[in-house]
């Protein structure tokens, strides 16, 4: 029982451009690459979830067809919303705005859109509802979402972690995680609050967000 995060392939956009929820297409994997990727995934997958952004959804759709698994689109798996800075060159963003964000990386959003803290809330909502404590689930998503999940599962250094394009990270569900996850959902029904973090996981390396 596990939740497997798969990052999309290389986005087709110039280096130095700010993009999060900007709908950027990604390089299409060849049939050989898709076959090799499929072979790394467990046959026990019960479903595939995906960000609605095309760089994830296109890959998820091909995998769902190849593996004959149901596909669900979930907006909570989208990358962070950079607001008015979507599609801007990083070099054109005012230095003061960058400094404001650097001073409070998780809470500030001088660009409008969404803060890291706000993004983490929606990612945690997905984790709370995903049935990976009962079966294997694949989520095709973005680096920012993987980092939020990494932190939600109790790891440190999420801003420094790396995951390559079309590479995956697996969070296993040992008994301790299942218990914490189940208790968390039960409390949400009673009190509408979630405060716990759960450990677990394994990581593969590589580049940019």
Image (tube, rainbow, N blue to C red):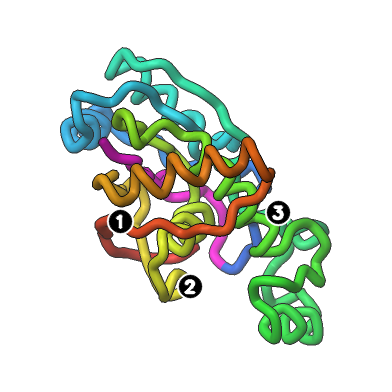
- Percent from the top left, x then y, of residue 95? 76, 85
Could one spot residue 202 in this view of the protein? yes
Q: Does dot 2 land on a helix, a strand or a loop?
A: loop
Q: Nearer the viewer, mark 2 or mark 3?
A: 2
Please tell me whether the stretch drawn in magenta is mainly helix, strand or loop.
loop
Could one spot residue 169 in this view of the protein? no
* Crowd tier of the residue under label 3, counting other residues whose Cα lies within 10 Å: few below 14, some 14–19, many 20 or above: many
* Crowd tier of the residue under label 2, counting other residues whose Cα lies within 10 Å: few below 14, some 14–19, many 20 or above: few
Write the residue at 23% across / 36% down: 37
Q: CA distance from mark 3 to mark 1?
A: 27 Å
Q: Does dot 3 land on a helix, a strand or a loop?
A: loop
Q: Nearer the viewer, mark 3 or mark 1?
A: 1
Q: Earlier in the sequence, mark 2 or mark 3?
A: 3
Mark 3 and 1 residues: CB-CB less than 8 Å, in contact?
A: no
Q: Earlier in the sequence, mark 1 or mark 2?
A: 2
Q: CA distance from mark 1 to mark 2?
A: 18 Å
Q: Does dot 1 land on a helix, a strand or a loop?
A: loop
Q: Badge 2 is on which residue?
A: 159
Q: Earlier in the sequence, mark 3 or mark 1?
A: 3
Image quarter hosting the N terminus: top left
**Residue 93 appears left or right of 155:** right
Q: Badge 3 is on which residue?
A: 81
Q: Nearer the viewer, residue 6 or 93?
A: 6
Q: Which residues are magenta?
A: 1-15
Write the residue at 77% across / 83% down: 100
- Percent from the top left, x then y, of residue 24? 59, 44
- For residue 3, which quarter of the picture? top left
Q: Badge 1 is on which residue?
A: 200
- Percent from the top left, x then y, of residue 174? 24, 47
Q: Is residue 11 magenta?
A: yes
Q: Nearer the viewer, mark 1 or mark 2?
A: 1
């Amino acid at each position: 029982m596990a939740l497997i995060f798969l990052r999309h392939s290389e986005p087709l956009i110039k280096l130095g451009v700010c993009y999060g929820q900007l709908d950027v297409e990604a390089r299409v994997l060849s049939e050989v690459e898709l076959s090799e990727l499929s072979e790394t995934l467990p046959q026990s997958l019960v479903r595939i979830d995906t960000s609605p952004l095309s760089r994830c959804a296109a890959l998820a759709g091909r995998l769902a067809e190849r593996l004959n698994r149901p596909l669900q689109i979930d907006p909570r798996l989208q990358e962070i919303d950079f607001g008015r800075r979507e599609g801007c060159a990083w070099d054109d963003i005012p230095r003061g705005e960058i400094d404001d964000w650097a001073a409070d990386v998780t809470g500030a959003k001088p660009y409008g859109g969404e803060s890291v803290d706000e993004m983490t809330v929606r990612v945690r909502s997905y984790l709370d509802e995903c049935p990976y404590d009962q079966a294997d689930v694949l989520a095709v998503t973005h680096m920012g979402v993987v980092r939020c999940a990494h932190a939600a599962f109790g790891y440190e250094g999420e801003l420094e972690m790396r995951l390559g394009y079309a590479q995956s990270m697996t969070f296993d569900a040992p008994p301790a995680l299942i218990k914490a996850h189940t208790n968390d959902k039960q409390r949400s029904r009673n009190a509408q609050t979630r405060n716990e973090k759960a450990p677990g996981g394994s990581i593969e390396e590589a580049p940019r967000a």
